[in-house]
Image (cartoon, rainbow, N blue to C red):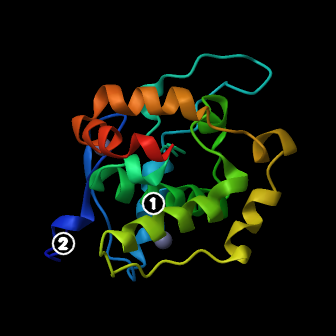
């Protein structure tokens, strides 16, 4: 943290590993560095789409949930928003996200729309501090991916099941909002 008080809302717990990590302030160039740091161990050696190699999910620390944003507790709402920025940062640095693709944890073609949907929900919950818009040009890195990677999709039913089984706060919100579909 280097003595910088980022405020409580800039902390998140990784949904897969439970590891807590600081969010950089939105206008902080540390965003890119942190994204890179998070991505460093995530490209699994020896795995490729054709090899069918098993990947240890424990090393994958980013995820797009792709469920109705209203179902997400604050931690998961801010977490998924941050992780979309991390995915883009990872790609911009020329790092691979194939482990995430192979495990259906991200949906590259939806980075911008999903980011904007999450931000709209953050705003609906009176959060006014968003300073990290995603422009179309930021998503050009997606076009450099193999086509089958670009169009990889998250199974949102499985995703919702995973989320509700591990987060009581999301489960509570789901119960409140599930009639919204
Ligand atoms: Zn943002
Ligand atoms: Zn949650």
Which residue: 66% across, 30% down?
102
Query: Where is 148 relative to 73, above or below?
Result: above
**Quarter occupied by residue 136:** bottom right
Q: Which mark is residue 2?
A: 2
Asked whether 65 or 135 is in front, the reply is 65
Quarter that holds the N terminus: bottom left
**Percent position (x, y) of residue 69?**
45, 53
Q: List the single residue furthest toward the front.
A: 179
Q: Is residue 32 left or right of residue 7?
A: right
Other-residue count near label 1 (Cα within 10 Å), few / some / many at <14 / 14–19 / ≥20: many
Pointer 2 and pointer 1: residues touching (CB < 8 Å)? no
Which residue: 76% across, 27% down?
49
Q: Is mark 1 within 8 Å of ligand 1?
A: yes
Q: Is residue 123 left or right of residue 45?
A: left
Query: Where is 17 relative to 35, above or below?
Result: above
Q: Earlier in the sequence, mark 2 or mark 1?
A: 2
Q: List the single residue furthest toward the right.
A: 147
């Amino acid at each position: 943290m280097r003595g910088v008080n980022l405020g409580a809302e800039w902390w998140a717990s990784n949904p897969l590993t439970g590891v807590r990590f600081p969010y950089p302030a939105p206008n902080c160039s540390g965003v890119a560095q942190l994204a890179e740091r998070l991505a460093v161990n995530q490209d699994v050696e020896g795995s490729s789409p054709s090899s069918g190699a098993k990947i240890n999910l424990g090393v994958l620390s980013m995820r797009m949930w792709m469920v109705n944003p209203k179902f997400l507790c604050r931690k998961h709402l801010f977490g998924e928003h941050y992780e979309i920025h991390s995915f883009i940062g990872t790609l911009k640095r020329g790092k691979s996200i194939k482990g995430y693709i192979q495990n259906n944890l991200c949906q590259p073609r939806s980075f911008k729309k999903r980011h904007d949907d999450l931000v709209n929900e953050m705003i609906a919950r009176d959060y006014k501090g968003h300073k990290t818009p995603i422009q179309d040009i930021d998503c050009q890195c997606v076009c450099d991916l193999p086509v089958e990677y670009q169009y990889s999709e998250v199974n949102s039913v499985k995703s919702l099941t995973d989320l509700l089984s591990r987060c009581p706060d999301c489960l509570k919100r789901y119960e409140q909002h599930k009639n919204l579909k």
